[in-house]
Amino acid sequence: MLKQTGLTETEVQQRKEQGLQNNYEENATKSTKAIFYDNIVTLFNFLNLIIGICLFLVGAYSNMFYLVIILMNISIGIYQEIHARNLVQKLSIVNQQKVNVIRDGQEQSINSTDLVVDDTVIVHAGEQISSDMEVLSGFAEVNEAMLTGESDLISKTTGAELLSGSFLTSGEVVAKVVHVGADNYATKLASEAKVHKPFNSELVRAIRKVSKFTSFIIIPFGILLFLEAFFFRTSGIKASVVVSAAAVLGMLPKGLVLLISIALTTGVTKLAKKRILVQDMYSIETLAHVDTLCLDKTGTITEGNMRVTTVHPMTTNVDLAAVIGSYLAQSADSNVTMQALREHFPEADQYHSLDVLPFSSDRKWGAMALADFGVVYLGAPEKLMPANKLPQQVALAQEEGMRVLLLATAEGETVPEEKGELTPLAVIEIEDIIRRNAEETLAYLYNEGVDLKVISGDNPVTVSNIARRAGLPNYERYIDLATCDTDEEVMAAAQKYTVFGRVAPHQKKLLVQALQNEGRTVAMTGDGVNDVLALREADVSIAMADGDDATRQIANLVLLDSDFTSLPEVVFEGRRVVNNVTKVSGIFFIKTIYSFLLSVICLLTATAFPFIPIQITLIDLAIEGYPSFFLSFEGNNNRIKGKFLPTALRAAAPNALLVVVNVLVVSFLARSNGWAQIDTTTLMYYLLIGISCLAVVKACLPLNPLRIFLIVTTIGGIYVAAMLFHSILEISLLHAGSFAVFVGMMILNALAYIFLTKTLPTPPMHKKQADAKFFH
């Protein structure tokens, strides 16, 4: 190689002052400010805050206790996002690499972020390219799979371009830095995905729909109820604000929002113990809904490593271990195939190297002249010998999808420019190592209604054979996307095929989009810059911890052990959250429905809303929060059925209707019998508690010891609390007459509830669930 002196320290400092340093950070994670903003500035929080301010201004401080629930929900969301972001940033710091540069004529090691334009860099086999460079001297084989998805090796000689993010697999070069920071190829490719994508959550969408609907009602209803109370009933400003606040507060499912956050945060904690980092806690839920999973081959189905499985000696007169060991000890090649050979064959020093020709992806073979033995050739069988002279073991192994190497020899003390007739010494079978439990994982996902797609930059036949060995259904349906000339052809292929080979980065994104256009919920795994665009597009993005920094930053989930076989654990957690939240959601929407209906009735009849915020808050805590919290921890791996919001509203409707009917009946009895207002309110509140507890009983079916305990403690606890704190709740104790009415009406309520729950229609199965059945 040519003697290089590199830049002087003065020239380095000048370039740093000009901003020509490789210290640009393409950070796709959310800033702390953005995390706080997204968790605080929401319509749901705004509506609750406005109501709280109104209560504060009139001195109704005890009725503001509900704000604790809002603050807890905000705090959980902020903590979870900041915690996950910080873990990803720590991963990036750990993976920071060193590079060897020549400055002032001396070789020195520096951080890759300290590189500047025109720096002279020495890159050895096995090292990653930190910045775009131009080769000044030397020869190397480069793997650009992290950028292009193709694992074929590219030869690089003087004048060739080295792209940031690629790896040297063999050889050594001296190169000059031509681009830094944002101008690097890898950074430009990743920049399209730098904006943090919004999360995809059916549970949150349902809450937002309710919040949006009630936002059109809350403000006008609140104003009208206040005016009606203040002017028509002359209730006084404090009483008018309190009753109108109770009506509109009841329409917002505060407890459900908190329960969802707690359930998801619990899932995040559980998954963290299993080495799965959840950056977006709502992705746990989304993955539970996924019906299509796009997998990368290398590093996902396979470990990204090779393994020698069988060696077929072609002669008994040669010590193969000594020949191969000597070859490996004196070869600079370090691609995955050579690494597999080194793991299988111990290096030896029996034969000394006289001449070496490094492996070339163009030739598909390398050679070495060994003293006292001859020239040894190692490479692709079809490139070393004519097909009619190849040992039969070669064809048999290739039919099984194995990678095959031929070890052959010829006489000589130097490697000739043109190889002559060779004598085979051995056929070596090498396989891509399938991840442990990969077959069981793929089978589980497929049997659970998840359609599996393998997307790779490698040869489709090779990928198909690996998919076959991993037990992937429909592995024989493969296509070479290099043959597709238009985006329309690529998108059409998404539905027809299972294995996609020779896929360019933008084609991965098109495949995801095509699947989403069919109404599918798509998850995507990846580890390289070439996967970034598709990961950004997918409903759930899953990155490997040992992959590129850009993929880790934008992914919803990061597999810290880089093992996709842990995905079922995430699916289980998502199902647990969604199924358990759906099971208890009816309890929370009771208040939303009856608050709306009673508000309409109050406006039409010029009567006061029967409850106040502190009364509603006790129900939030004791009936909605307490049993739901414990039920949300129960295991539930069943498939998710139906949409969340219709299911929740249907479950809540019987209870809500009974509350409205009971309030009307008690109002009628009070007027007919001249009951005192305090007795009327007390009876209404006790009936509200009883009807809400019916929903708790239903959510606890089928019964088990824990659920029986929850039923007993919920019913007993809230009635005891209502009696102990009756003055704060602005109610009294039931006397003999009202108690008899209460018991009689609750018996009727229980019978009516059984009837209503059996007669209301079941929500239809939604499209994604139908898709899941189709694929199953």
Image: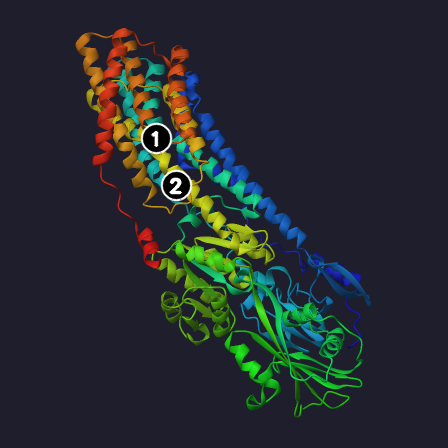
Q: Is residue 162 visible?
A: no
Relative image position of residue 499 (x, y in whole percent)? 44, 68
Tell me the residue at 42%/33% (across/down).
Answer: 631
Which of the two marks, 2 or 1, is nearer to us in this view?
2
State the separation of the CA atoms marked 2 and 1. Answer: 14 Å
- Quadrant of the rendered image containing residue 130: bottom right
Depth check: give the residue in front, 477 or 2. 477
- Quadrant of the rendered image containing residue 359: bottom right
466 relative position to 684: left or right: right
On screen, residue 213 above or below 475:
above
Mark 2 and mark 1 in contact? Answer it, CB < 8 Å.
no
Callout 2, which amino acid? Asn
577 relative position to 236: left or right: right
SS at circle 1: helix
Q: Residue pushed farthest left?
A: 672
The residue indicated by pointer 2 is 579
On screen, residue 316 above or below 550:
below
On screen, residue 722 above or below 498:
above
The residue indicated by pointer 1 is 587
Callout 1, which amino acid? Ile
